[in-house]
Amino acid sequence: AGSTRALGRVTRVILSPSPLVIQGADEVATMSEGKLLQGTCGWASPHQALSIYGGKVRGSEERLRIYSRKAFAALEIDTTTYAIPNPERTRLWAGLTPPGFTFLVKAFGAFCGSVDVGNLPKSTRAVLGVDRADGKRVNYSDLCEAAREDLWTRFHAALEPLRDAGKLGCVVFQFHLSSFGPNRTNRTHVEHLRSRLSPRIRMAVEFRDRAWIQGDEARRTVEWCRANDFALVGADELWHETMQPDRAQTGLRPGEVKRCMPTLLAATCEWGSVVRVHRRHGTRERLLEDDEIRAWGRRIREVAPRLRGPIWCLWGTDWKDAAIENAAKLAAAVGDEIAFDWIGMQKKASMQEKGGIASLFAKAQKSELSAEDRAAVSLAKTHKRPAEVHPARTV
């Protein structure tokens, strides 16, 4: 007879006599200790025209389903910087992706500085007594406690479906280039954010002001991150792109030379490490040069043995298959011992599923199935799956 057993977050669906095993998040987490998991910064942008989508214009949900099975093991949700999604949306995202897939979520912008009033949740605007059309920006430091509490409640509600599915890697807090230098006030603010973020959720910090990671300040920053269990993001950006507004990139000006911003990758917590790479302008300019790939390969190989979790590398190189090509080169640079073969794992899972279902169909032709297995075949014929395999989708 068929049976279904849930082992923690590991779900096994067995259709006797041929077992169909779906690897769960805990199993993948164990396999990915000290391994490189890669993904992109966002997935729904029209500029991210990956060939895996078959050249067709697809909705964000279909893109995510394909992306998570044919390209990458992880994904940064970057839209959360501008607006907090409702839990139904994040539950849908969790359900569209296979077991073991991880999301890294960028923190809502208000936590790291300021946001437009119109981007605040409706409930928060009601607490503040402001209208969406006010056109003002609001600073976190100016919010009353009731408004802060409402923001954190909304943000945690959005994260909960991802965490419950075992698919939340961490939350990335990115602090501004011009207004967030290394000082006691700003460290206290980051510690405050850690105190408000659920202790069940991991926290990564990225400082766009490179003063945090240069000279003697670098040692202080690393020690402070270790003391607070923050993952210190290793960010790769170009000088000229960083100094230009994101939506007004013009490339190198006449006479300018391409330079990378200072970066640092350190093992500041056991649970994992995060790398974010951006190339914001041009076409082939978004493909990293061989020496840049080799440098990241060295950094990752040095950090990997110190971790009990993965190294996530997220690519913000949206031009054709630039992200896929960059990821493939980095995987080769770190070697098979560190590069996690996510695509190979997905192919194996697909073959197991097809093999299990094919076996059931073959036995069905000979009338050898039990009542439970006949029900499983009926589900397969109608393209349905038990809830334990694919969580119910809520739109």
Image: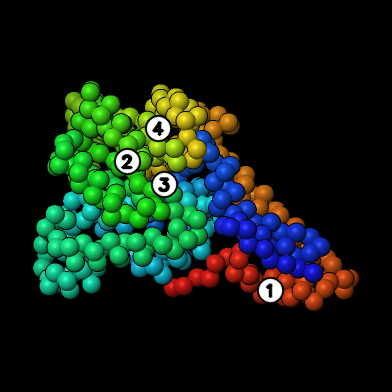
> Horizontal and vertical percent for residue 151?
25, 63
Q: Position of residue 276 (x, y in %)?
A: 36, 40
Q: CA distance from mark 4 to mark 2?
A: 13 Å
Q: Residue 258 — which label?
A: none
Tell me the distance, in whole angstroms, between the alpha carbons under discs 4 and 1.
Answer: 47 Å
- Most foreground residue, 250 or 364: 364
Q: Residues within 10 Å of mark 3 (few under 14, many from 20)?
A: many
Proximity of marks 3 and 4: CB atoms separated by less than 8 Å: no
Is 144 on the left or on the right of 267, as rendered? left
Q: Going from the N terminus, do you reach mark 4 or mark 2 first? A: 2
What residue type is disc 3 on? Thr
Q: Amino acid at mark 1?
A: Leu
Foreground: disc 2 or disc 1 = 2
Disc 3 versus disc 2: distance between alpha carbons?
Answer: 27 Å
Q: Quadrant of residue 153?
A: bottom left
- Which numbered disc flags the more N-terminal residue, 3 or 4? 3
Q: CA distance from mark 3 to mark 4?
A: 22 Å
Which amino acid lies under the numbered mark 4 shown in the image of this protein?
Answer: Ala
Which of the numbered marks, if any, corresponds to residue 228?
A: 2
Which residue bears the numbered disc 3? 40
Crowding at label 1, few (<14), some or many (≥20) Cα neighbours within 10 Å? few
Q: Position of residue 192 (x, y in %)?
A: 23, 49
- N-term mark: 2 or 1: 2
Q: Is residue 266 left or right of residue 143?
A: right
Question: Is the residue 193 above or below the residue 186 in the image?
Answer: below
- Identify the residue at image location x=58%, y=31%: 337
- The residue carrying mark 4 is 267
Q: Residues within 10 Å of mark 2 (few under 14, many from 20)?
A: some
| CB within 8 Å, label 3 to label 1 | no
Mark in the foreground, 3 or 4: 4
